[in-house]
Image (spheres, rainbow, N blue to C red):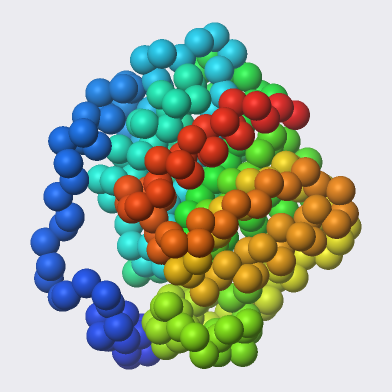
Amino acid sequence: MPLTEQRKKELFEVLDRTSPRPKNAPAPEYPQEYKDFLKLSEEEILTREADGYSYTLYIYRAKNREKNCPIHINIHGGGFVAPHAPCDSMFSSYLAHEIGGIVVDLDYTTSREASWPVAFDQCYDAAQYTFDQCEAWGGDKGRISIGGYSAGGALTAGIALKSGESGDFRLCLQVLGYPPLDNLIHPLYKKDGYRRVLAAERELAFTELYFGGDKEGMACPYGSPVYASDEQLRLVPRALVISAGGCNFRYEDEEYAGRMASVGVEVTVKRFPKASHGFIPHFGEYWKEAVDLIARSIRSARV
């Protein structure tokens, strides 16, 4: 049953009450060094539509890109609730430069406007569009990767599963940055569930808003990738899984990496023990080390 407007209001009140940032706090001010990352690439903004909702693509073409360059699709986080932010553009432009290619930065419709599966379908549409445009953009179809952080990582894992099954396109790499991969089980029932970094009620509110009460969506592998079968996992691309010590999702992320490896998928796992959830695109401590690893992985990945 879809969520009522009253229930949505209650859930957003939970998010406001449990937010680590004070209500109406000003947006973070990034150092000029990070703002200057935007000078490393040329930006193009496109609008597309899927499931009756429009979404935006920010395309960053590195000024140092070469012919037949890699293309990476970037999916931001934010609990499926927060929209694209300035740091996502800075991060994507920097990453485009580091890989000597193109980054397609995706601003999907959040759960403030629409619930499952709108955001997922938009991300899948964006990936298909990227493959369709690859040659015109001067990219290599064998070097198209996808990655995301937190909610974006969950969307990434689902897309890797669906594209592997459908054969619609072949990704060379999936980058999973500390994503919630089990959106069905109550957070307190997970490993170390009572030693919370993210309040359980906050995590539950994000999940309920995203799925809109759709239990089947919560349990399906595209919504909760940990429930993928071995047969489904065998078809996914090479993976880079990044977890953080200050993140409750680290256990399910690393267990998912182990399952992929157990069926023959090439997997690299890196935990940053002292890092916090969300540290990579928000330029938290250790972000540079993480991006160096991501860029190396993208540059070396091929179908």
Tell me: 290 left or right of 55.
right
- Note whether 195 is above or below 171 in the view shown: below
Q: Could you tell me if residue 116 is visible in this image?
A: no
Picture coordinates of residue 207 (x, y %)?
Answer: 49, 77
Identity of the residue drawn at 35% across and 31% down: 93
Identity of the residue drawn at 46% across and 14% down: 65
Q: Quadrant of residue 228?
A: bottom right
Picture coordinates of residue 294 (x, y %)?
Answer: 54, 38
Tell me: 173 left or right of 197.
right
Q: Quadrant of residue 104?
A: top left
Identity of the residue drawn at 40% across and 84% down: 199
- Which of 89 and 133 lies nearest the eye of the viewer? 89
The quadrant of the rendering that contains the N terminus is: bottom right
- Which of 86 and 97 lies nearest the eye of the viewer? 97
The quadrant of the rendering that contains the C terminus is: top right
Picture coordinates of residue 137 (x, y %)?
Answer: 50, 18
- Note whether 246 is above or below 239 in the view shown: below
Q: Can you name the residue that lies furthest to the top here?
A: 67
Q: Could you tell me if residue 175 is visible in this image?
A: yes
